Amino acid sequence: MDGPDYYIPAAALGLALAFKLPGMRRNWRDPLLRSVCALLALAASTFFFAAPPTITAVNGLAGVPNFSAPLVYSILTALGASCLVLLVNWRGGPPEETRTVARRWMYGYGAVVVALNVLFSLGEAPVERLRDLDTHYAGTPYIREMIVLYLAAHSVAAAAMTAMCWRWSRKVHGWLRTGLVTIVVGSLFSLGYGVCKSAAVFARWAGADLDALSTSVAPPLASLGALLSAAGFVLPLLARRVAHQWSAWCAYRRLGLLWRELRTVAPHSTPSVRIPRWAPVDLRVTQRESDIHDGLLFLHPYFDRALRADAQRAALGRGVCPEQARAAADAAMISAALRARAADPEGRVISSAGAASSDDSGPAGPAEPVEGPRDLVLISLALRRSPAVAQTRRSRAPAGA
């Protein structure tokens, strides 16, 4: 593998991290989000610092042959720890227990990182090796122990990830299961990297030559393993966000008919705040719901409770479920109120309602409150589809108008 084979995955992971950083700034106390960002940062760093051109540059800047070896091994070890910590935070559980398990992994792998650097400082590796340091120094005191230690730590993390994610994946469904299975596959590739590297080192100890496993087979396995594991962690979180955005856009679009109908009766003295097109969809849904509630409040004097009750009974008689029947009844009442308001351009009903309210005898409102985004969506859909609304539109406006 050459420089681009390392830099392209590093750039892709860095881009994913860049998309996560705004959320990290807003919710930096969220341990799950912190773990995701740490995983992406360490995975990108592993690819970047493991690239042969970067190794040459780091060794040259440090002035120490093979200085990149403990650096890359330390980042790779930290990556394994971050995967385990992320998995612990992802699974959840009692907060204190989760923090305790996460700390154990971090402290254990932190000790490994310290040991790697101490062993490198005690050993001697005077000849720079860009691709085969593991096998070239497999018999060198202290360097040998450093190599075995990082391979053991990496393999333990990969095996633990495989076992935990596989057990968890058998208990869940949907995108979470897909992400966990992806992590399992990535962890198996990472475990294969450790096996190939270890086999090449053990072969050197036995006087054999399996260096190709370390230099040609292991690096692609590590790349696939890191990418798949990162994708497995990010995929369910991304799918959840996409599903939320899609649901919000559907709600925004479905509220459109009710919103447009009620805008025609809203007071011109209280125009709604204009929200730019690039505003978050949740904010746009909130504004549309607020405008609808303002319109319903303005139409309140024209609501006909008897008409609503008749429409609900008729819908239930047609076999419509209670929730849909309530929405159809509200839609019929709103449609009739819109016709009544159009027939009362001078606002006599509103004036009389105001006078009545001053005598503590307020106008009759709807039998049940029209509240909540789900109710509003159903009402908006019923305005277009409900037979009760069609019948109301064919009839004349209520006599009170």
Image (tube, rainbow, N blue to C red):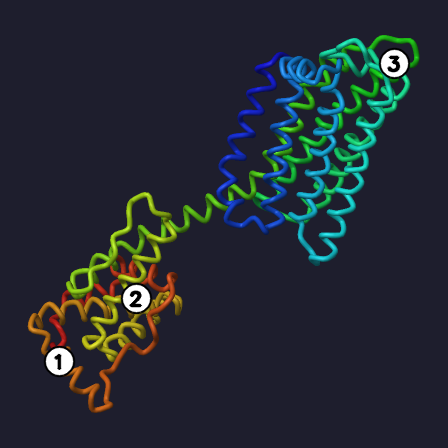
Seen at 79% across and 30% down, the residue is 155
Q: Secondary structure at mark 2?
A: helix
Q: Secondary structure at mark 3?
A: helix
Question: In this picture, is 190 found above or below 178?
Answer: above
Question: In this picture, is 132 found above or below 165?
Answer: above
Residue identified by numbered label 1: 351
Disc 1 crowd, CA 10 A, few/some/many (<14, 14-19, 20+): few
Residue 55, image quadrant = top right
Locate residue 337, reporting x and y percent.
18, 71
Seen at 22% across and 77% down, the residue is 304
Disc 2 crowd, CA 10 A, few/some/many (<14, 14-19, 20+): many
How much space separates mark 1 and mark 2, taking CA atoms? 29 Å
Q: Tell me which numbered mark, 3 or 2, is placed earlier along the sequence.
A: 3
For this rendering, which residue is in front, 261 or 148?
A: 148
Closer to us: mark 3 or mark 2? 3
Seen at 23% across and 68% down, the residue is 334
Residue identified by numbered label 3: 203
Residue placed farthest to the bottom in the image?
359
For this rendering, which residue is in front, 312 or 337?
A: 337
